């Protein structure tokens, strides 16, 4: 009889019993609703042991890659250790590089702490030591890098972003929790096209995803749209142009709402621009990051243009309360 280890205790699972049924029988409450693998309310994570294929049916590839599964349809065949929440460990490290990418975006590189593992495109929660103010920042680096790269935009009156711009310096200590987020590339279907759209520092996770995808030798066409109000808000233009020159299947399109349009760029509302270059998003994997309202619009646009909901990954940069 398989044993289920949960929060320091072991529970046995009877023959033909699901993990949800076993836990409920033992008086352990796991939130659930449909009990048939549809609503995903009972999604939990296997910390040890392999969830059944049935219990991962319909989950996004990024959730499967992190061993999430549905407890209501999982009949374990081996001992498993499970966790309810995405509790992430805390790390302390130092700033090794700080440079401006444009007038309002700074690049911060942190020494990668040993034992910190992540997927390109995930984010970390940076904590200021003296008052524990915490904000999420996406990783622009890839796991093979020695540093964790962040792109941070200065927000008027923003507590954390102004502190990072004006006070944080090289050699200072920084604490963070993580990684978190499921906006990342999972290898497979290498010939399928990819669409990456970021507004402002929404480029940060996409820059990581892009480098990861190229390192994994993705074969399908990759469109990267970076949008900003004006050309001054764009950054890493030179690096991205060089990458596109090296990789024929990468199409980098800088986009602006107003003013001068960079070479090879587009002008207008970012939600309307991809349709000018791509007829249908059927078969595309889509990654959308940045301003929450625009990301929301882009999700709708992507779905209406043919992308499957399962293949749309997004990180809206929602503000803290
Ligand atoms: C998953 C995730 C990933 C993120 N990744 C990044 C990243 O890679 N780079 C990055 O720069 N930011 C990122 N953010 C946003 C970041 O976490 C902070 O919200 C941002 O830096 C502002 O924090 P602050 O303390 O400076 O401003 P606050 O003190 O929290 O806010 C000050 C005022 O500005 C408003 N405000 C906050 N953010 C914005 C904004 N973007 N635009 C307009 N008004 C705003 C607030 O409503 C408030 O009125 C991410 C957010 C999430 C949820």
Image (cartoon, rainbow, N blue to C red):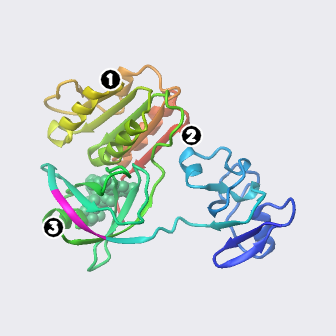
Q: Circle 1 — which element?
A: loop
Q: Identify which residue, 258 or 8, lies in the foreground.
A: 8
Q: What residue is disc 1 on? A: 248
Left or right: 229 as drawn, with respect to 93 = left
Provide residue 227's location: percent of width, then percent of height. Answer: 27, 37
Disc 2 packing (10 Å; few <14; some 14–19; many ≥20): few
Question: Distance between the Cα atoms at labels 3 and 2?
Answer: 41 Å
Disc 3 packing (10 Å; few <14; some 14–19; many ≥20): some
Find out whether the residues at labels 3 and 1 contact each other: C-beta distance under 8 Å: no
Q: Residue at x 35, y 43 (%)?
A: 206
Taking the image as drawn, is residue 222 in sight? yes
Which quadrant of the rendered structure holds the N terminus?
bottom right
Instruction: Locate ligand 1 by image quadrant.
Output: bottom left
Provide residue 87's location: percent of width, then percent of height. Answer: 51, 69
Q: Circle 3 — which element?
A: loop
Question: Distance between the Cα atoms at labels 1 and 2?
Answer: 27 Å
Tag in front: 3 or 2: 3
Residues in magenta, as a range: 93-98
- N-term-proximal mark, 1 vs 2: 1
Q: Circle 2 — which element?
A: helix
97 in magenta: yes
Provide residue 245's location: percent of width, then percent of height. Answer: 25, 26
Taking the image as drawn, is residue 318 in sight? no
- N-term-proximal mark, 3 vs 2: 3
* Residue 169: mark in rendering: 3
SS assignment for the magenta stretch, majority: strand
Left or right: 53 as drawn, with respect to 238 = right
* Residue 310: mark in rendering: 2
Q: Residue at x 22, y 24 (%)?
A: 264
Question: Distance between the Cα atoms at labels 3 and 1?
Answer: 39 Å
The residue furthest right is: 15
């Amino acid at each position: 009889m398989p044993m289920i280890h949960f929060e320091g205790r072991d529970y046995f699972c009877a023959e033909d019993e699901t993990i949800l049924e076993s836990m409920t029988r033992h008086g352990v409450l796991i939130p659930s609703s449909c009990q048939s693998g549809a609503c995903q309310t009972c999604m939990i994570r296997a910390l040890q042991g392999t969830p059944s294929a049935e219990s991962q049916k319909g989950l996004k590839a990024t959730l499967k890659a992190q061993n999430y599964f549905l407890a209501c349809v999982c009949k374990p065949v081996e001992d498993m250790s499970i966790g309810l929440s995405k509790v992430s460990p805390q790390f302390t490290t130092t700033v090794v590089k700080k440079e401006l990418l444009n007038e309002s975006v700074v690049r911060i590189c942190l020494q990668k702490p040993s034992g910190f593992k992540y997927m390109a495109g995930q984010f970390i929660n940076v904590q200021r030591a003296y008052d524990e103010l915490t904000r999420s920042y996406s990783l622009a680096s890839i796991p093979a890098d020695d540093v964790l790269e962040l792109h941070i935009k200065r927000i008027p009156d923003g507590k954390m972003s102004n502190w990072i711009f004006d006070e944080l310096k090289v050699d200072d200590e920084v604490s963070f929790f993580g990684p978190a987020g499921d906006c990342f590339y999972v290898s497979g279907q290498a010939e399928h096209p990819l669409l990456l759209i970021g507004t402002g520092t929404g480029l940060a996770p996409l820059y990581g995803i892009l480098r990861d995808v190229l390192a994994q030798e993705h074969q399908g066409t990759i469109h990267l749209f970076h949008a900003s109000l004006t050309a001054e808000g764009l950054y890493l233009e030179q690096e991205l142009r060089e990458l596109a020159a090296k990789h024929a299947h990468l199409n980098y399109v800088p986009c602006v709402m107003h003013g001068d349009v960079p070479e090879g760029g587009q002008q207008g509302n970012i939600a309307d621009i991809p349709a000018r270059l791509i007829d249908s998003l059927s078969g595309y994997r889509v990654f959308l990051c940045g301003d929450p309202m625009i990301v929301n619009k882009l999700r709708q646009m992507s779905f209406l243009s043919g992308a499957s909901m399962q293949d749309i990954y997004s990180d809206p940069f929602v503000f803290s309360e």
